[in-house]
Image (tube, helix red, strand yellow):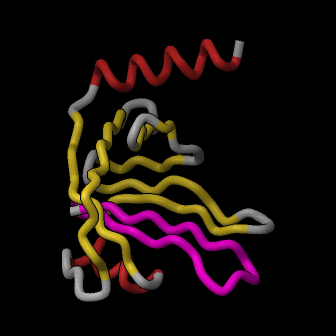
Amino acid sequence: MKKLILLLSVFLLSSCSDTQTLDRYSCSDMSGAMVCASSGETNSCVKRDSTYRIRVNTDKNQVLVNGSMKKDCRVYDKKNWKCGRATGTANIISGMKEGHFYEIFKVYRAESGSYSCGL
């Protein structure tokens, strides 16, 4: 039943909203991803041969990124939202600031993480 509800939500989200396609950048650290998302500067980020496809439903606080429904979202408008939260073992957050996308995946007590942005 949960899968059916999720599939219906994904279908409704994809059919009722605009899709944004953004170039993907991998960043060396969290601050690089956040600077990229704040100002569009990519000094510590490298452009990849992939994109982010993002759909936002402001009425239902739903965000779909590359076909994956994000959890725990707060949607202010299509260009400003934040999803995810810190868990007991990791910091998994994605969001958009003024149309610039960022994604942070950092496991606590680990040397590295995954940081990216989309413009």
Residue at image position (20%, 81%) is 41
Q: Main secondary structure of the magenta part?
A: strand
Residue 25's image quarter?
bottom left
Number of labels in the image equals: 0
Residue at image position (57%, 75%) is 113
70 and 60: which is toward the camera: 70
Residue 4's image quarter?
top right
Tell me the quarter of the image containing the N terminus.
top right
Residue at image position (42%, 34%) is 67
Residue 35's image quarter?
bottom left
Residue at image position (57%, 22%) is 6
Tell me the quarter of the image containing the C terminus.
bottom left
In the image, residue 54 lies at what x, y percent?
31, 43
In the image, residue 88 lies at what x, y percent?
80, 66
Left or right: where 28 falls relative to 55: right
Specify the segment rendered in magenta.
97-118
Task: Give the farthest residue toward the right.
Answer: 88
In the image, residue 110 lies at what x, y percent?
71, 81
* Location of residue 14 with respect to 79 vertically, above or below: above
Left or right: where 75 falls relative to 41: right
In the image, residue 104 lies at what x, y percent?
50, 68
